[in-house]
Structures are given as C-alpha cells and as structure tokens.
Image (cartoon, grey):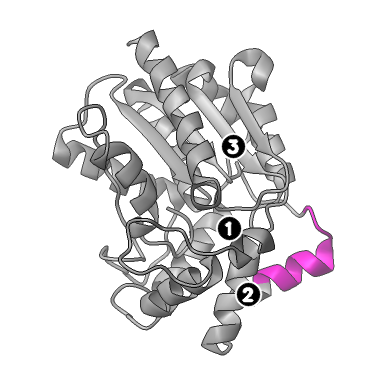
Amino acid sequence: MGLGGLKTAWQRQTKDFSHTQAETYSSLIIDNRGAGESDKPMMRYSTSDMAKDVLEVLEHVGWTADRSVHVVGISMGGMIAQELALLVPERIASLSLISTAPRLVNTVGFVENLRNRINLFIPRALDDQIEHVAGNLYTEDFLSKPDETEYMVKPFPTNRDRFAAGEVSKRTQPHLFNRTGFIAQAIAAGWHHKSPQQLERLGDAVGRERILVMHGKEDRMITFPHGEMLAQELGGEESGVTVVFVEGQGHVLPIELRRFFGERLERMIEKTEQMGS
C-alpha cells in the first residue's frame, strides 16, 4: 500500500479476486508499519525494512514455496515490492509495480518540486488536506462522477464524497493514522533508491517476463517519467517486461480503472502460472 494508505484500500481487488473467485485466488493484504492496525514506532523506516515486515508475514502464513506469490505494490508499496523481490526472487510468481518508482527524482522543476514536498507536512484544515490529496491522487473526471461502489448499502453522491468520507474516518482515528507514522513512511519513500544495476539484477533474478510496470501518464503523485525510468531500467518491453502506460490517468489506477486493472492483473497471473516454476 502507498504512503499513509490502509489495507482496506484494496477492498475492490479482494472482492474481485479472493471473494468472487475464491476457488482460484487467495489474497493477503497488510498495513505497512506506520499505518492502520500495524505498529507506528517513532524511528527511521526504510523500504527495505518494510519489505522484511512483509516477508515475516509471508513466513507466518506459510507462503514460502518457489514461484508461489503474486506481488502487487502501488506507489510506496511498489517500492517495498522491489525490495521484497530482491530479498526472495525465487518466491515471486509475478511482480506488478503500479504507479511507483525506483527512486524519486525532480521532474517538475526545482520550485514546484520543493513546494510539493513541503505541502506533505504543512498543517492545514482537514477539508483543505483532503481536497489537496484528492487532486493529487485522482483525475477530476473520476472525482466528479457518481459513486457506483456496488458493495456499499448506500452510495455517496460522487467519488469525491466517498474519498472524503474515507479520509475523514481515517484521519480522525489516531490509532489508524497519525503524524508520526505518516512522516516516517514519507521519509522511507523519499530515501528509496534502486540503481539501474540493482534493477538489472532484480530483472535477472525474478525474470523479466514475470514483471508488470503500470503507470498513468497524468500521475501527479509520482510523475510519469518515474514509470518510464522504472520500465527502461528493468529492460523494457523488448526484454520481456510487460509495460502498460495509460493515457489521461492519475495515480490510483486500481480504483479509478478497477475493471481494466483487474483484467491486466489476471492476464499477468495467468501467463506466469502457465510458466510454472
């Protein structure tokens, strides 16, 4: 899961996969340290340590066989997924890296880059915070559309209203979301760094035909050049990496393009399952 996100953000995918297709899929989702029901220690976090957290959970539930785990990570979660794949490449059946980066670089100019980073930490009214985050995560077209989340008893007027309600719920429960955990996660994401050489090693170890890179071209949270950089340094499509760049789309593809995202993920899983171990 991404910066400050809760595992419940994957509820659409858990429904589409492990609920409605329970005979085929099992899903495992966790809250990263610093958010949700996981601990929020005041210490420096790193994406490599957070990958070790995931590994401990996999060990606990017994998902340890070779080529047994289909790993999906978005944003900071995609950074953690890179670290996990380097730790246990032999266990990775497929690796889907969504709206993420091998490292954060300045793609928007010094002033705007500085302003964007400072805005993460400036205290502001809750409604201003939520509107700012919504604009960075989603397209305006999606936010203004009617809420069609079918598993809820009563839909909200728009997707913006549903997002705002979720953020209010999260941000008014310190045991789920607090400043200590958020800042520690932000530092971990900011310091994440995988060099071209490390990505080459990752591709060699996991197998490039097992890797999916997906990124929205209008992503304002982790800008599109990061997705291009990740795909290129893993070897690109010519090496076997599956690359999906989506026109006109922002950061949270699993929610905004739920059906499309699910279909591409299923296609990746089916392909790699046929490859075997």
Q: Is residue 41 above or below residue 252?
A: below
Residue bearing the label numbered 3: 214
Q: Magenta region's main secondary structure?
A: helix
Instruction: Give the CA separation, mark 3 to mark 2.
Output: 24 Å
- Neighbour class for label 3 at 10 Å: few (<14), some, many (≥20)? many
Q: Quadrant of residue 128?
A: bottom right
Give the residue type that dot 2 points to. Answer: His
Q: Is residue 121 visible?
A: no
Is label 3 in a helix, a strand or a loop?
strand
Is label 1 in a helix, a strand or a loop?
helix
Q: Which residue is pictured at 66% across the width and 75% down the height?
A: 118
Q: Is 1 placed left or right of 66 in the picture?
A: right
* Residue 190's disc number: 1
Give the residue type that dot 3 points to. Answer: Met
* Residue 132's disc number: 2
Q: Is 201 placed left or right of 91 in the picture?
A: right
Q: Is residue 114 magenta?
A: yes
Q: Which residue is pictured at 42% across the width and 46% down the height?
A: 48
Q: Nearer the viewer, residue 199 or 15?
A: 15
Q: Which residue is pictured at 63% across the width and 14% down the height?
A: 239
Q: Quadrant of residue 7?
A: bottom left
Q: Nearer the viewer, residue 38 or 195?
A: 38
Q: Is residue 121 magenta?
A: no
Do residues under tags 3 and 2 come within 8 Å of each other at their CB atoms?
Answer: no
Instruction: Please tell me which of labels 1 and 3 falls first in the chain.
Output: 1
Give how far across and how far down residue 42 sits, in percent.
36, 72
